[in-house]
Amino acid sequence: MDYLKLVLRLIHILAGVFWVGSNLLFGLFIGPTVAATAEAGQKFMAHMVTKAKITTRITAAAILTVLAGAWLYWLDSDGLTSAWKNSGPGIGFGIGGLLGLVGLVFGIMVGVNTAKLGTLASQIQGKPTPEQMSQIQAAQKQLAYAGPVSTIALILALACMATARYWVF
């Protein structure tokens, strides 16, 4: 039994489940709820970001997922030299990996802007100042763009990874 591949696969799958699941939970439920609940939502988000360190944890899971996946791809393709990389599964995992990287890049943008909003929310006493309001709007604009791109990329990556072994060309 190849224990390295087993450990890498476990890391890749478990960290990936946390990463993609967190992305979907935040994008579909928590983000809209925070926006709809005004001050209470701001306090909740401030706690999630500053005390629970949610953005740090999701980023760590994303990086672990990408690194373990890249290592697995490297091992399966014999250092990118085997014909496997041009097979159906090789192409499927490759496309999934590229989509995962897109999800990571845009996810980092989401994390940075979520952290900004959480930090701002913890600093606001009462009504936001015009400068704070400007920063909030800029971060929300970035989130409105980066969030859906990250989510779509991760859903497509997940679909590729789940089905790649069955791809035939």
Image: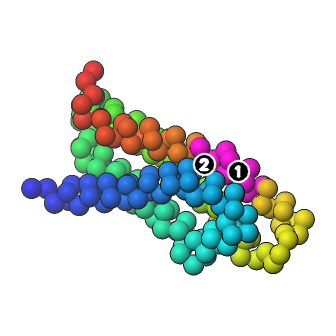
Whole-percent x, y for residue 126 in the image: 83, 75
Q: Which residue is at 87% across, 66% downward?
A: 131
Identify whether 115 is placed above or below 98. below
The residue tagged 2 is: 147
**In the image: residue 121, left or right of residue 15:** right
Q: Quadrant of residue 117?
A: bottom right
Using the image, tell me which numbered label, if any, was put on residue 142: 1
Region in magenta: 138-148
Q: Is residue 51 left or right of residue 128?
A: left
The kind of secondary structure element at disc 2 is helix
From this viewpoint, is residue 68 visible?
A: no
Q: Position of residue 122 (x, y in %)?
A: 71, 76
Task: Give the residue displayed 50% in from the left and 62% down from the top.
Answer: 59
User: How many circles with numbers are drawn on the protein?
Assistant: 2
- Judge from the rendering whether residue 123 lies leftward or rightward of residue 22; answer left or right: right
Q: Quadrant of residue 97?
A: top left
Residue 99 in the image: above or below residue 36: above
